[in-house]
Amino acid sequence: MRFLGIDYGARRIGLSYGDELAVATPLPALTEADPEKRWAGLRAAVAQRRVTEFVLGYPLNMDDSVGFKAKEVDAFAAKLRAEFGLPIHLVDERLTSYEAESTIAKSRRRDVRASGIIDSRAATLILQDYFNQKFGVPPPVDDHG
């Protein structure tokens, strides 16, 4: 089992990796301006990590409806299927980018956003959510109460 977690965006694609240990680790985001170069970077990541399955963030609206962004992800998923023929698992990604961004100091967010770090952190959260659901890892205990 070799999973590639993906936070798809029209300008940047965040990536993460995980295997049978069920621990998601961020990878460098694909930030090339040219979509073909981003796709070539994705191909390279899939080959290098010998990926067997994709976990793709699915941006549902807060009311559970499928909006424009989710339709973009549907098109991206279709392209993944056509190119690689590997299983694709869609994971509700609502608020993952917000959660990933909240770990960055406000004064640094603009610079960091362009680097793709937030996108890959979001991909890591998406993949870890999938692992937690699939392997039954319990959510963290809040011991502040």
Image: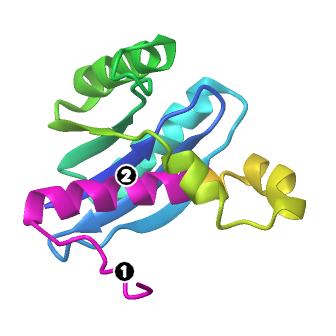
Image quadrant holding the C terminus, namely bottom left
Asked if one can make out residue 98 in the rendered structure from this viewpoint, the answer is yes
Reading the image, the residue beneath label 1 is: 142
SS at badge 1: loop
SS at badge 2: helix
Q: Is residue 4 magenta?
A: no
Residue 111 is left or right of residue 82, and the answer is: right
Query: In the image, what residue type sits under mark 1?
Result: Asp
Q: Position of residue 123 (x, y in %)?
A: 45, 52
Residues in magenta?
119-145
- View extreme (left): residue: 135
Reading the image, the residue beneath label 2 is: 126
Does label 1 or label 2 sit earlier along the sequence?
2
Q: Which residue shows up at 35% across the image and 16% down it?
A: 65
Asked if one can make out residue 2 in the rendered structure from this viewpoint, the answer is no
| Foreground pick, 16 / 71 | 71
Q: Which residue shows up at 29% across the image and 57% down it?
A: 129
